[in-house]
Image (cartoon, rainbow, N blue to C red):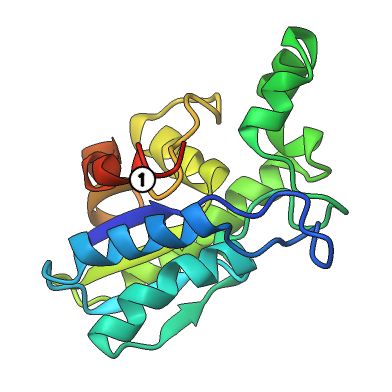
Amino acid sequence: MKIVLVRHGRPDEGHAERPHDPPLADDGRRQAEAVADLLAGEGIDRIVTSPLLRARQTAEPLAARLGLAAEVVDGWAEADRHLARYRSVETLKAQGAKEWQRFLADPVRYMGGDTVSFQGAVLGALAVLVAAGPRDAHVAVFCHGLPINVVLSHALGLERIVHFPPAYGSITRLRVRSVGTIGIVSVNETGHLAALRGHDR
């Protein structure tokens, strides 16, 4: 099975009506379109998304082009889902080195969750996806930075969860035979976003 993990586009941080689960900002919508431009011709036959709005809206352009319904799977949600306000990586870093290191030391607990439960939910969602098959399926999963890191850490046998912040709209590709046999094809692809960089400054 080929799995494409897509981090959501840039959300409208501080959105007045939905600060806890913001929609995409304008540049996030452009990133979602760029993801669809790239993946529409790659034979994706299933689309899965986190229940959070920023992930669902990132999946929409590809789902519309392919005529596929995006399946909402709770286990792909971000650890901050129950917080009152979404905070981007940029916002966390701007709070200073000490606060940033506190986040890196235990990111799930920092966001109000339990690390073991969160890892279990993400890997459980992955296991269900793989078990559903078929082996030649090509699935796009629209999710978040921490779930992507959890899957990569699991694939590499690493204890630490966070190793890097995936870019908004970035793509990470996997070849998966089972949850215990995950090949990493690419990490944090952003070439499809290159044309947007000048536009979104």
Q: Residue at x 38, y 44 (%)?
A: 199
- Residue 100 occupies quadrant: top right
Number of labelled discs?
1
Which percent across, then down, holds residue 163? Answer: 48, 24
Identified by mark 1, the residue type is: Ser
The residue lying furthest to the top in this view is 97
Is residue 1 shown to the viewer in this render?
A: no
Q: Quadrant of the N terminus?
A: bottom left
Left or right of 198 on screen, residue 7? right
Which percent across, then down, holds residue 20? Answer: 80, 58
* SS of the residue under disc 1: loop
Label 1 environment density (alpha carbons within 10 Å; few <14, some 14–19, many ≥20): many
Q: Residue at x 24, y 54 (%)?
A: 176
Q: Nearer the viewer, residue 31 or 114?
A: 31
Q: Residue at x 72, y 27 (%)?
A: 92
From what the image shows, is residue 135 above or below residue 167?
below
Q: Residue at x 12, y 66 (%)?
A: 42
Which percent across, then down, holds residue 201? Answer: 47, 36
Left or right of 21 on screen, residue 143? left
Is residue 113 shown to the viewer in this render?
A: yes
Left or right of 145 on screen, residue 23? right
Which percent across, then down, holds residue 185? Answer: 18, 41
The residue lying furthest to the right in this view is 84
From what the image shows, is residue 191 above or below residue 141?
above
- Residue 25 occupies quadrant: bottom right
From what the image shows, is residue 157 above or below residue 144?
above
The residue beneath circle 1 is 170
Q: Nearer the viewer, residue 180 or 175?
A: 175
